[in-house]
């Protein structure tokens, strides 16, 4: 059997996986997403581990997968697109009002031309089903995957252990983020319990198509320079740990005993290290810039609200 041809996907410099903070912004402007609980979760660098899982959840929706497969070129640079998504989310969360709106406009322009009908049918989505990038229900699902994954990865890999009240606050404070990205209020679940129910119900109806599997293979393949030994295996391990088991199986990354053991070891390490990390390593620089911009007393930087001391 001949060897498979090597991928020609452009590699991304390792430094690009750590997007820089935007400019300082307008002093005193908290931006559209000032909620401390939402920022507490989003500000953790460990959320980068959940990026692939969030994308795989999104494209398990057949209409999202169709739009990405037809209108995007993920295979030409999946890591670059993950970085772009991360940078947009961080800028909207921590930027001032104009920075956040500019990032959202950029995303909106990219989604505006995405429209068409499905080429093939899958259970629940017959061939010829229309889709569009600015569909409110699809926008809600994309938002939900970001919120759900960030919460899950910080609880499992940063040890935040949100209380029921903190989970409720996190969901409520995510709504301004959704509205910046044109998710209308009418489709947003009212409470975190309703949000969790919405996610469970949606997951039950997801179908991993061949297009979704192709995109997932590109996302879960190492594309950095210099190469990061073990990066691809770690991405698959964490993604399998975060995804609902049926979806992980459908993507071909089941929770094998070896993956479960690797995930436990990684969780043990990251949760042990997190309390002793300085803020400049534990938090995204975007969060630190937002602290400085909104701190009343010049030169005084307070740690983010966490419910416990931050080292």
Image (spheres, rainbow, N blue to C red):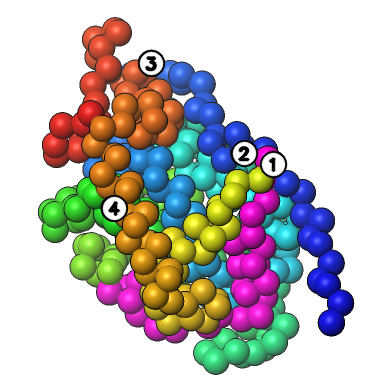
Numbered circle sitting on residue 14: 2
> Are the residues tagged 3 and 2 within 8 Å (C-beta)?
no
Q: Position of residue 101 (x, y in %)?
A: 50, 37
**Badge nearest the viewer, 3 or 2:** 2
Q: Secondary structure at mark 4?
A: helix
Whether 116 is among the magenta residues is no
The residue lying at 60 percent from left, 34 percent from top is 15
Instruction: Give the mark, 4 or 1, whose residue is nearer the N terminus.
Output: 1
Calculate the distance from the C-alpha at mark 4 to the C-alpha at mark 1: 28 Å
Q: Is residue 19 left or right of residue 286?
A: right
The residue lying at 46 percent from left, 64 percent from top is 237
> Are the residues tagged 1 and 3 within 8 Å (C-beta)?
no
The residue lying at 23 percent from left, 62 percent from top is 192
Residue 1, picture quadrant: bottom right
Calculate the distance from the C-alpha at mark 4 to the C-alpha at mark 2: 25 Å
> Are the residues tagged 1 and 2 within 8 Å (C-beta)?
yes
Instruction: Give the mark, 1 or 3, whose residue is nearer the N terminus.
Output: 3
Instruction: Give the mark, 4 or 2, whose residue is nearer the N terminus.
Output: 2
Calculate the distance from the C-alpha at mark 3 to the C-alpha at mark 2: 32 Å
Start and end of the magenta stretch?
Answer: 197-226
Q: Residues within 10 Å of mark 1 (few under 14, many from 20)?
A: few
Numbered circle sitting on residue 268: 4
Q: Which residue is mark 3?
A: 27
**Badge nearest the viewer, 4 or 2:** 4
Q: Secondary structure at mark 2?
A: helix
- Location of residue 245 with respect to 310 vertically, above or below: below
Whether 201 is among the magenta residues is yes
**Residue 160 makes an appearance in the image:** yes
Q: Which residue is mark 1?
A: 225
């Amino acid at each position: 059997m001949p060897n498979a041809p090597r991928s020609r996907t452009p590699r991304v410099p390792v430094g690009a996986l750590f997007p820089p903070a935007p400019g300082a912004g307008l002093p005193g402007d908290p931006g559209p997403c000032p909620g401390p609980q939402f920022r507490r979760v989003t500000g953790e660098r460990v959320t980068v581990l959940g990026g692939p899982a969030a994308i795989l959840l999104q494209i398990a929706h057949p209409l999202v997968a169709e739009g990405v497969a037809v209108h995007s070129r993920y295979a030409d640079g999946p890591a670059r697109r993950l970085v772009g998504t991360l940078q947009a989310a961080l800028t909207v969360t921590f930027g001032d009002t104009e920075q956040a709106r500019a990032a959202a406009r950029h995303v909106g322009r990219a989604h505006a031309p995405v429209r068409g009908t499905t080429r093939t049918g899958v259970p629940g989505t017959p061939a010829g089903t229309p889709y569009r990038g600015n569909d409110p229900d699809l926008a809600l699902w994309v938002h939900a995957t970001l919120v759900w994954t960030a919460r899950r990865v910080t609880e499992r890999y940063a040890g935040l252990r949100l209380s029921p009240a903190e989970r409720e606050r996190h969901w409520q404070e995510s709504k301004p983020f959704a509205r910046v990205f044109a998710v209308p209020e009418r489709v947003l679940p009212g409470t975190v319990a309703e949000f969790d129910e919405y996610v469970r119900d949606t997951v039950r109806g997801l179908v991993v198509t061949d297009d979704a599997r192709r995109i997932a293979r590109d996302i879960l393949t190492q594309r950095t320079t210099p190469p990061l030994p073990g990066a691809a295996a770690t991405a698959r391990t964490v993604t399998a740990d975060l995804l609902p088991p049926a979806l992980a199986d459908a993507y071909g990354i089941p929770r094998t005993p070896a993956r479960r053991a690797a995930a436990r070891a990684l969780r043990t390490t990251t949760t042990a290290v997190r309390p002793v990390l300085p803020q400049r390593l534990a938090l995204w620089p975007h969060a630190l810039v937002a602290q400085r911009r909104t701190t009343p007393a010049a030169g005084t930087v307070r740690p983010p609200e966490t419910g416990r001391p931050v080292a």
